[in-house]
Amino acid sequence: GKDLLGLYNLSKAEIHETLKTAVTMKDILNKKVKEVPTLKGKTVINLFYEPSTRTKSSFSLAAKTLGANVMSISKSDSSIVKGESLLDTAKTMEVMGADLVVVRHSAPGAAKFLADNIAASVINAGDGAHAHPTQALLDIYSIQEKLGQVAGLKILIIGDIAHSRVARSNIWGLKKLGAQVAVAGPQTLIPPAIEKMGVKVYTDLDQALENVDVVNILRIQLERQASGLFPSLREYRKIYGINAKRLKKLGNKAIILHPGPINRGIEIESSVADSSQSVITEQVKNGVAVRMALLYLLAGRENKNENFN
Ligand code: CP
């Protein structure tokens, strides 16, 4: 299709094609394969209404590595602060030649709204608590790279499920590929509807950690908590934080993921984040490769090169 809005409307074959393309892209990043400017002459716009370090910079790097022109617009330093609408902002970018708009917004459905109203391709870089498909794809890529395949694995997502677009996109993608997915966290941060997505729900973390292959730890999103956090951060750390003792319980074959940014000492202890079982820094690198793959698949294929058949 024209856009990437979420993993719910991507087929298993499309997910596999993206992952396979990302393997080649990682070879380019690791200088095993020569760079090819398949996006030469294309313009990619990052349109970010919420803060970002990883997603925005990795899209910029991905687009530049493939030879595209890249521009980034943030809410705080653009005419958005003067009241210009999302659609008018995106249309302004289109007039300047945008072929692809990467959008992050606090409103669920913002990316779909843009996709329905502009001719350029739209990639959802996070829309409220709804979806963050490129994060889920890089998480899936990282799991596959470390453990060979996703099908049949037991994957536990821990923490603030209620506010997490990362959790929802991971569940959609991982289940499509045949993983067994469970979530764990305080009842106050787990929406009842999550069970309808076919995941097991635990409030007892130590029970949830048994026989798990992959742990994906989420950040407590204080910025989305309307009325203060319950349990408190101190209680959260004790009951749900992943520390050295819990890592030991997981065993040395399990891997630790976190989309970042991490709150060290809250949902994850530094000794776990920096351990040999942690994939957190590799996830960031994989994020560039996966975003290169997505840009290529959405906008670069007409400039097809023999390296990408
Ligand atoms: N994981 C993630 O989306 O990070 P940023 O908010 O820094 O882009």
Image (tube, grey):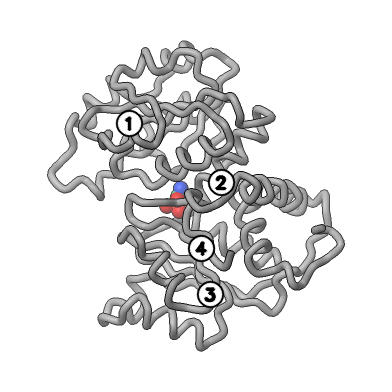
Residue at disc 3, secondary structure: strand
| Residue 27 sits above or below residue 41 on the image | above
| Label 2 vs 3, first from the N-terminus | 3
Residue at disc 1, secondary structure: loop
| Label 4 vs 2, first from the N-terminus | 4
Q: Quadrant of the N terminus?
A: bottom right
Front of the two marks 4 and 3: 4
Q: Nearer the viewer, residue 231 or 148?
A: 148
Q: Badge 1 is on which residue? A: 266
| Residue 124 sits above or below residue 130 on the image | below
Amino acid type at mark 1: Ile
In the picture, the disc for residue 137 is: 2
Q: Residues within 10 Å of mark 2 (few under 14, many from 20)?
A: many
Query: Can residue 78 be seen at all in this image of the molecule?
Result: yes
Front of the two marks 1 and 4: 4
Calculate the distance from the C-alpha at mark 4 to the C-alpha at mark 3.
15 Å
Residue at disc 4, secondary structure: strand
Q: Nearer the viewer, residue 37 or 273?
A: 37
Beta carbon at label 4 within 8 Å of ligand 1:
no
Amino acid type at mark 3: Met
Calculate the distance from the C-alpha at mark 4 to the C-alpha at mark 2.
13 Å
| Label 2 vs 1, first from the N-terminus | 2
Please say if the residues under marks 1 and 3 sit with CB atoms less than 8 Å apart.
no
Left or right position of 144 against 208: right
* Residue at horizontal 41 percent and vertical 56 percent from the top: 126
